[in-house]
Amino acid sequence: MHQIKVNNLWTALTLASAVMVTACGGGSDVSTAGQAPALTVNTAASVYAGPIAGFGSVIVNGVRFSSVGATLQDDEGQDINLDQLKLGMTVRVTGAVDDTTQLGTASQLALVHGLQGVVATVDASANSLTLLGQTVLTNTATAYQGVTGLNQLTPGQSVEVYGSLQADGSLLATLIQLKTSAFTTLNVNGLVSNLSATTFKVGNLTVNYSSTVVNGILDNGKRVKVKANASQFDANNNVLTASSVKIEETSSVYGSTVAVGTGLKIKGIVDKAPVNGLLTVSGTPVNVSQAVIKGNVGTLTTGQSIEVKGNWDGNVLQAIQVELDGYRASEIGGNNELYGAVSSRTGNTVVVNGVNVDLSTAVIGHGASLAQVVVGSYVEIKGNMSGNLLQATKVELKTTSSDNVVGDVTYEQSGLVSNFVSVANFKLNGLTVDASRARFEHSSATGLSNGVYVEIKGIQGNSGVFVASKVDIKNQSKSEEND
């Protein structure tokens, strides 16, 4: 059976020449918005790949995926927990999607790790830093964890960077995460250049692979993932002696294959001009000849970030829809979304799903006021990340008529159990939880106690009680890794 390897879809390949896509009917490569495509997406079996845009369920490419009970691992097959996920991280989600409601149920979620290393230089005036021979660029959309912004980073700090590769080989960051402890293993993803019998380059980093078994045939232009022991990096000469080199096109990283007929939506970079409706997006062949384009219809340019949805036919993603960068943000009021309860408030800053949110300039909907947003309130927030803070543009307060589970306010949360009295009375993130009617995944109610890490799906009723419909008890230590 034909399969595609979808690896680091959010990390773009080297960009080519300008791409002109005229959306004006006739012989155009992309259908104009409003034309009905000839294809429909397989929503029962779908893969969505891109940066995390929100929580309350994990939100990827516009879909809220319920992930409580799903298999969560990183791209090395190591188990992870929901509270390790942050806005801007790259993930690949497998599951079913309802196109009408834009809700999904994940069966698998894979975290695709980014660049992992030690900061070499920081240039705040140029909005850039370097590590492992790679230049990392930042912009106003770059999110931060552990620091408020680029000006707080200093050489010698360990960071992980998620983002997209640009035409000049630099990495435009979607998230920079400061680590509290040094890496024992370094990680570099990129394109091979200057290949020789023993070395090649990724950006300005020279990789010595002479003692490494490579899982395929190396060639210039191929995408690789390089790992090495931290002690094997020569910072003076930017040389890394690899312990592992994986060619991304042929690697079998957990969850990276897509079977024929699977619905596929990717967020990536246009890197090859369309010919007869065919182009590539972050290395994935795409046929846009029958696609509806959404956004500022006109010309696509090389390096533009887009989202493409369609079906994988074994060789090409047959697209039915293309969303231009910024389209969804203009529709909903921001790039990021949160669905959940306020766990704390200080002034005009609240915490929802572990994200700090500034409400000072937000529009509060349905005639509500900022004063009504209190600890325990269920809120739906739209906004944009600025440093380590989400600047809210819209906030909606919602309640339900009873404590029964109602679909329009269902959300998910995770954390450590506290104030445990019974399965019908304990606290999570400051909220009282009733799990007496919940289904327990991979565990039972007897496993609940103070300090236990849980992931819960449910609804918050008028009484302020979060009524759980699904509970997954997991290893607490996983929630503490890679902070």
Image: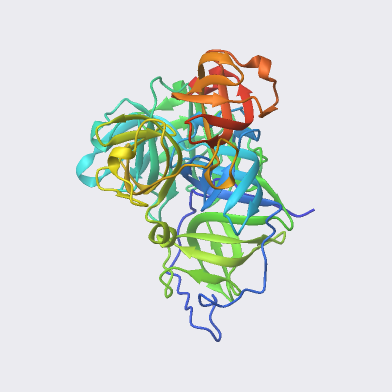
Left or right: where does residue 96 sit relative to residue 227?
right
Left or right: where does residue 307 sit relative to residue 447?
left
User: Residue 339 at x, y = what percent?
Assistant: 46, 42
Is any part of residue 191 visible from this angle? no
Number of numbered callouts drawn? 0
User: Residue 136 at x, y = what percent?
Assistant: 35, 43
User: Residue 321 at x, y = what percent?
Assistant: 56, 66
Is any part of residue 395 visible from this angle? yes
- Observer-nearest of 417 and 208: 417
Task: List the single residue furthest toward the front.
Answer: 401
Task: List the single residue furthest toward the right.
Answer: 1
What's the residue at 42%, 73% (across, down)? Answer: 299
What's the residue at 42%, 62% (across, down)? Answer: 327
- Tell me: residue 433, above or below residue 262: above
- Observer-nearest of 43 and 119: 43
Q: Quadrant of residue 326?
A: bottom left
Q: Quadrant of residue 344?
A: top left
- Tell me: residue 335, above or below residue 241: below
Q: Quadrant of the C terminus?
A: top left
Left or right: where does residue 102 sit relative to residue 441?
left
Task: List the single residue furthest toward the left.
Answer: 125
- Tell me: residue 464, above or below residue 385: above
What's the residue at 55%, 62% (across, down)? Answer: 280
- Observer-nearest of 279 and 132: 279
Q: How is the image coloured?
A: rainbow
User: Residue 12 at x, y = what percent?
Assistant: 48, 52
